[in-house]
Amino acid sequence: MKNIAAIILAAGKGTRMKSKLPKVLHQVCGFPMLHYPIAQLRSLKAGRIIVVTGYGGDAVREAFPDKKIAFAVQKEQLGTGHAVMQAMGALKGFAGDVLILSGDVPLITHETVDGLVRFHRGGGKGRPALTLVTAVVAEPSGYGRIIRDENNSVVRVIEEKDCKGGERRIQEVNAGIYIVRSEFLFENLKKLKNRNAASEYYLPDLIGMAVKAGRKARALTHIDAGEVMGINNRVELAEANRIMRERIADELMRSGVTIIDPLNAYIDSGVKVGADTVIYPGAHLLGHTVIGADCVIEEGSRIKDSAVGSGSTVRSYSIIESTMTGKDVAIGPFARLRPGNVIADKVRIGNFVEVKNSSVGKGTKANHLSYIGDAVVGAGVNIGAGTITCNYDGAKKHRTVIEDGAFIGSDTQLVAPVRVGKGAYVGSGTTVTKDVPPGALVITRVKERVIEDWAKKRMKP
Ligand code: UD1
Ligand code: CA
C-alpha cells in the first residue's frame, strides 16, 4: 500500500516475563514474537519499518539483521508515547499514514492490519486524524479502557491505573494498534504530558487530544479479541503459542495434511508439508523444514531445518537436523541425523544409527546401531549392525569413502581416512585401516580357537 510507514514498539523489558531475554525475543512457534508484526508490515509493503528498541536492544537488532528495518533507540522506557517520539527522526520527510504496532502482539493477522488501513482511509469527508483497534473482552484488566460519548464516538482511552469509579468495569479495551496521519503525529506527539498514575507519556492520549482539537478519531472494533492480545507474561506466551499452533495446523489440514492430534503437533510457522502426509502426536517440525507428500511422521520425531522427500517415513523418536533426504526413505525409529547430510532416494537408516555430515547413495541401508560420520557412502551399500566410522583421531576429522555396492559386515571399524572400493566386502569384526580395492575382501579377525573342556579344566582345584 502507498504512503504507509510503520513503527513497532519493542523497547520494554517485559518485566512480567521475569526474564533476561527482552520480551519480544521470546518465541512463538519458532520465531521471536517480533517477527510476526514485521512480517505483516512486509506483506502490506510498508515503505519504512522502524523498530523502537531499548532493553536488550543489541540482541533485538542482531535477531533481525534486515537492512530494510530501521532501529530507533529509547534509552529510558518513559512510556509508549515517548517510544514513538524516538522514531520521529527516522520518519523525517514522510507524509502519509503511520501504523503503530506493538512488538508483543504476535497473533495479529494481515486481515486486521490491512482492514485497519482501509477503514482509516475510507472515512470519506473529515478523514480521521487517527484510528485505533479496540476489542471487547471478558477480562479487561491490564488494558486501557475505551471511553465513548453519547453518540458512541470514541473520546479517549484511560489506562487501568488511572481509572476512576465505574471506568474499570468497561470491557472495550485498546488493542494497542493504531494508524495516525503523519502531520497529526508530528504536531501532537511532542505535546504529550506524563501527568498520570504511571508518570509515563501515554501514546493513547493522542486520541483525547485529537477529539479535543475537533479532529476525528475512529475505532475499529475487533471481533476476535484473542488475535489482538498482548503478551505480558509466560501464561499469555503459552496461550499465544497454542493459538498460533492451531492456525498452522488448520492451514496444513485444509491443504491436505492429516494431523492426528492438531494441538499436539508442534509445527513452526513457515514449515511446508505436502498432501497426504500423516503427522502423529508429539512430532516437532521446526525451523525451515519442508516435508514432501505421502510421508508418515511418527510420534516424538524432531525434524529441524531439513527437507524430507515424498513417500518417506520418519519413525518414532528420530531426530533430524539440517539434512536433506530424497524420496521414499525410511528413518528410525530412534535414529539421529545430525547436521550436514544428503541422503538419496530409498535409503534406510534404522534404529540407533547416527549419521553426521555424510552423503548416502540411493538404496543404501544402515539398519541398526551404527555411526557414520564425515563419510561418502555410495549407492546400494549394505552397512551391517555396529559399523563405526572412526572419523576423529583426537585432533582432526577424516573422511571415509564407501563406494557403490560395498558390503560392510557387522561390528566393523573403518579408521579414516580410508576407502572401501566398489563392490568390496569387509568381513564382520574387521578394523579397516588401509584402503580396500574394488571387489576385494578384507578381514582382520583373529583366528578362531576352540578349546575343548576348557570350563571343566578351569574348575579343577
Ligand atoms: C498498552 C496501552 C494500553 C493497551 C495495551 C494493549 C499505553 C500507555 N497503554 O498497555 O492502552 O490496552 O497496550 O496491549 O500505551 N514500550 C516501549 N517503550 C516504553 C513502554 C512500552 O517501547 O517506554 C513498548 C513495549 O515494549 C510493548 C508496547 O510498547 O511492546 C506496549 O507496552 P506495554 O508496557 O506492554 O503496554 P501495556 O501496559 O500493555
Ligand atoms: Ca502489553
Image (cartoon, rainbow, N blue to C red):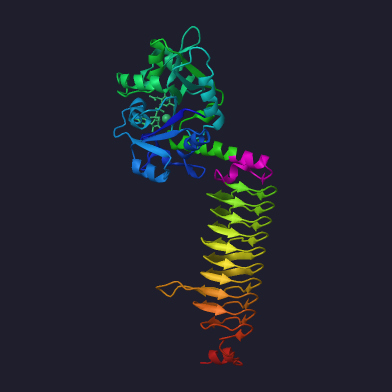
Compared to residue 132, the image places residue 414 above or below, namely below
Question: Where is residue 198, by image quadrant?
Answer: top left
Q: Residue at x 59, y 71 (%)?
A: 377
In the rendered structure, does residue 290 fall within the stretch colored magenta? no
Compared to residue 377, the image places residue 112 above or below, namely above
Residue 382 percent across, percent down from the top left: 64, 73
Q: Looking at this rendering, what residue extends furthest in the front direction?
A: 93
Number of labels in the image equals 0
In this view of the protein, which residue sits in the foreground, 37 or 221? 37
Residue 101 percent across, percent down from the top left: 44, 30
Is residue 120 among what the camera can see? yes
Residue 404 percent across, percent down from the top left: 63, 74
Q: Residue at x 53, y 30 (%)?
A: 227
In the rendered structure, does residue 256 fall within the stretch colored magenta? yes
Q: Residue at x 53, y 26 (%)?
A: 225
Task: Answer with the quadrant where ligand 1 appears in the image.
Answer: top left
Compared to residue 308, the image places residue 57 above or below, namely above
Residue 10 percent across, percent down from the top left: 39, 35
In this view of the protein, which residue sits in the foreground, 405 or 17? 405
In this view of the protein, which residue sits in the foreground, 426 or 4? 4
Compared to residue 189, the image places residue 453 above or below, namely below
Report whether 42 appears left or right of 80.
Answer: right
Is residue 101 among what the camera can see? no
Report whether 243 appears left or right of 185.
Answer: right
Numbered range of the magenta stretch: 248-270
In this view of the protein, which residue sits in the foreground, 254 or 378? 378
Q: Looking at this rendering, what residue extends furthest in the top direction?
A: 150
